């Protein structure tokens, strides 16, 4: 039999969590045509995968690629180079709109990987009510939102997403918003309201949505942020497991880093930004009475986060070596000022962002190992290589294989592959890919388990991983012999086609 692509002598992992086995994989016409002993077959392109693994293309459960689509930035390869062949967009309550036009644009312009979208709560709220956002909605408003959700599902959305961006989203509003998606076998993904001080209440809130709206839920980037909250993880696990025991469809995702990267300095407490907005100047924070109050809040903030040494500053655009990679305490010592003055100077400087190393490595490993948790990068396609970004944009998935399979043994290789493919396909309702099986769409990754390695770092994030020489999207090479191909073979996936 002749194939378009023939992968020989690989260890085949099917994405179900089953152990790998020796085999060949033949691809023809965009689908997996045969798996097994294909020694007598021929192909246009043959890959000798001796010593390497072949598995389903990875599915990234949490991205913000919808932003790239809105800006026509659709050809960057930082995700596909990780082995990601499908991304979930529209997360944290913000998506393209209308959904049908959004997906048509993907098909028209093309992407490196496939794309599916969730309809954003914030996006729909703004489409209906414009700037009239600072209010609680009532039942007639709920009906308008539900009609929008029904339209989104009709146009191919896989579900809905919420970001809890303000205090105006009541539980009744969210229940009503989620219900139409639940009735159409959609999913509800949410950046929960708190990942730190009110974590347990936030977990309880999203579980109520699953119960009231009768919908599968995806908890976005599950974490216990700040040392004061690290000991809450056991309770979180108990809450999720008990919900599953009650028959609720609960899953979560997590990226593979203990640090966040924010678009602002995060060097001052929230009250400082409120005062600056009210008075129109950072100078107002130097008023003795104001400064004392803000300093007290700043000390509380650092205490909750484990101290000022857990915050690192970096430039967003032009290089600033005087602050790059330094902590508030280091800058205070160099400038001979207090921590409040450090924050004021950084804010006035502009173009400074922060890295917060406020999460626990032990908790990260426990979260990754939990059977309800899969992998999501919380990233997007990176177009501007001069802008500082989070290493998860380049390293999330290879970091699983290198750091948490090969080095730490947190996961077995079959478990890790399942958490990056089959688990997400099942939970999101992706029926034509996500597993390695005959007749399924040929989204395939070939990697070397012994050499795969993430290279991105917090202060040097734009670094491609190693050890993933081939990525196949819809039966075509997206990465070939370690190099990105110029064509875009990804397309929009629609729930209505599943």
Image (spheres, rainbow, N blue to C red):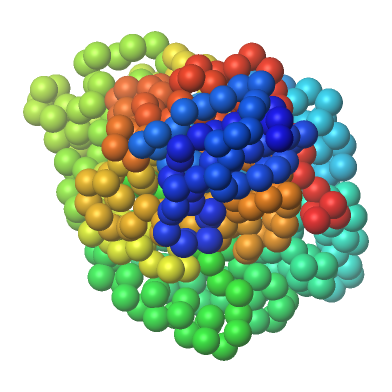
Question: The N terminus lies in which quarter of the figure?
Answer: top right
Residue furthest toward the bottom?
246
One can see residue 130 in this view: no
Please state which of residues 194 and 221 is positioned toward the viewer in this rendering: 221
Q: Position of residue 378 (x, y in %)?
A: 50, 44
Q: Position of residue 213 (x, y in %)?
A: 72, 76
Q: Residue at x 22, y 46 (%)?
A: 407
One can see residue 408 in this view: yes
Image check: 27 left or right of 297?
A: right
Q: Position of residue 32 (x, y in %)?
A: 68, 43
Question: Tag count in the figure?
Answer: 0
Quadrant hosting residue 209: bottom right
Q: Position of residue 208 (x, y in %)?
A: 60, 79
Compared with 151, 113 (above or below) is: above
Q: Residue at x 27, y 46 (%)?
A: 406
Q: Residue at x 88, y 60 (%)?
A: 150
């Amino acid at each position: 039999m002749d194939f378009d692509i023939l992968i020989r002598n690989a260890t085949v992992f099917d994405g179900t969590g089953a152990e790998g086995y020796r085999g060949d994989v033949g691809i023809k016409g965009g689908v997996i045509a045969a798996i097994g002993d294909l020694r007598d077959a021929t192909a246009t392109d043959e890959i000798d995968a001796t010593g390497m693994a072949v598995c389903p293309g990875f599915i990234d459960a949490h991205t913000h690629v919808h932003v790239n689509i809105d800006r026509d930035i659709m050809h960057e390869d930082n995700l596909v180079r990780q082995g990601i062949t499908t991304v979930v967009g529209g997360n944290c309550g913000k998506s393209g709109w209308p959904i049908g036009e959004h997906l048509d644009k993907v098909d028209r312009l093309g992407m490196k990987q496939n794309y599916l979208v969730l309809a954003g709560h914030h996006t729909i709220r703004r489409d209906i009510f414009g700037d009239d956002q600072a209010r609680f909605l009532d039942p007639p408003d709920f009906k308008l939102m539900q009609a929008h959700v029904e339209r989104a599902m009709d146009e191919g959305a896989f579900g809905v997403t919420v970001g809890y961006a303000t205090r105006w989203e009541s539980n009744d509003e969210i229940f009503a918003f989620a219900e139409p998606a639940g009735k159409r076998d959609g999913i509800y993904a949410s950046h929960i309201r708190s990942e730190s001080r009110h974590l347990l209440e936030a977990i309880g809130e999203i579980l109520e949505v699953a119960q009231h709206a009768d919908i599968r839920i995806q908890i976005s980037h599950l974490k216990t942020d700040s040392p004061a909250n690290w000991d809450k993880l056991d309770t979180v696990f108990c809450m999720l497991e008990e919900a599953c025991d009650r028959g609720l469809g609960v899953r979560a995702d997590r990226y593979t880093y203990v640090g966040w990267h924010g678009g602002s300095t995060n060097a001052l407490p929230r009250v400082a930004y409120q005062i600056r907005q009210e008075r129109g100047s950072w100078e107002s924070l130097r008023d003795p009475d104001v400064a004392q109050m803000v300093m007290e809040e700043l000390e509380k903030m650092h205490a909750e986060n484990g101290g000022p040494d857990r915050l690192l500053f970096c430039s967003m655009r032009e290089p600033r070596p005087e602050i790059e990679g330094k902590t508030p305490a280091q800058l205070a010592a160099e400038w001979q000022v207090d921590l409040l003055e450090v924050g004021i100077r950084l804010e006035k400087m502009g173009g400074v962002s922060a890295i917060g190393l406020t999460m626990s490595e032990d908790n990260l490993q426990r979260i990754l190992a939990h059977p309800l948790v899969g992998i999501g990068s919380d990233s997007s396609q990176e177009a501007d290589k001069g802008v500082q970004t989070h290493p998860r944009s380049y390293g999330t998935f290879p970091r699983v294989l290198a750091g948490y399979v090969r080095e730490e043994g947190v996961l077995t290789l079959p478990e890790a592959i399942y958490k990056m493919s089959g688990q997400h396909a099942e939970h999101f309702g992706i029926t034509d890919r996500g597993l390695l099986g005959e007749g399924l769409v040929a989204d395939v990754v070939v990697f070397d388990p012994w050499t795969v390695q993430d290279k991105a770092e917090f202060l040097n994030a734009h670094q491609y991983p190693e050890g993933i020489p081939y990525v196949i999207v819809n039966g075509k090479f997206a990465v070939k012999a370690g190099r990105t191909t110029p064509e875009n073979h990804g397309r929009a996936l629609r729930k209505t086609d599943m």
